[in-house]
Image (spheres, grey):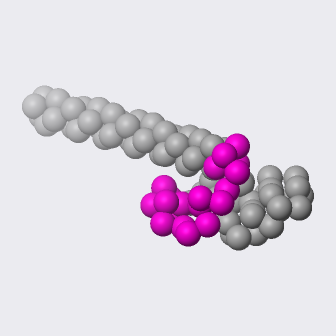
């Protein structure tokens, strides 16, 4: 994927660059850091990729916190219900 991005950068193929950056935003941070091509990515494209990774992780973290809060509320309700019985 990043090799294709580098070709897009070399020939200034904006649509290809946009598509590759969009796909690379789904990488894990470790995948991006371990990739030997990462140092060849233009800074602007690299920043877009890392911003996408961070945004995705923030959304996942928010969903996890909501689930955890709902689970805690359900547990509290069940405990209260058990005390009433």
Q: Is residue 73 magenta?
A: no
Q: Is residue 20 left or right of residue 71?
A: right
Using the image as rendered, state which of residue 27 and residue 42 is in the foreground: 42
Task: Relative to 2, say whether 64 is above or below.
Answer: above
Does any portion of residue 82 appear in the rendered image?
Answer: yes
At a point 48% along the width and 55% down the height, the residue shown is 29
Q: Is residue 19 left or right of residue 70?
A: right
Task: Relative to 54, say whether 40 is above or below.
Answer: below
Secondary structure mostly seen in the magenta stretch: helix
- Magenta highlight range: 28-46
Q: How many marks?
A: 0
Using the image as rendered, state which of residue 78 and residue 23 is in the foreground: 23
Viewport quadrant of the C terminus = top left
Task: Relative to 28, say whether 83 is above or below.
Answer: above
Viewport quadrant of the N terminus = bottom right
Choose top left, top right, bottom left or bottom right for residue 62: top left
At a point 13% along the width and 29% down the height, the residue shown is 84
Q: Position of residue 2 (x, y in %)?
A: 67, 66
At a point 66% along the width and 46% down the height, the residue shown is 43
Using the image as rendered, state which of residue 24 and residue 5 is in the foreground: 5
Does any portion of residue 81 appear in the rendered image?
Answer: no
Choose top left, top right, bottom left or bottom right for residue 67: top left
At a point 49% along the width and 39% down the height, the residue shown is 58
Using the image as rendered, state which of residue 7 and residue 19 is in the foreground: 7
Q: Is residue 39 magenta?
A: yes
Q: Position of residue 80 (x, y in %)?
A: 17, 30
Q: Position of residue 38 (x, y in %)?
A: 59, 61
């Amino acid at each position: 994927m990043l090799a294709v991005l580098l070709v897009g950068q070399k020939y200034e193929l904006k649509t290809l660059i946009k598509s590759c950056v969009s796909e690379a935003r789904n990488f894990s941070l470790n995948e991006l850091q371990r990739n030997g091509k990462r140092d060849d990515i233009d800074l602007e494209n690299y920043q877009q990729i890392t911003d996408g990774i961070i945004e995705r992780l923030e959304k996942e973290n928010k969903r996890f916190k909501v689930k955890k809060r709902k689970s805690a509320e359900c547990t509290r309700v069940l405990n209260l219900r058990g005390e009433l019985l």
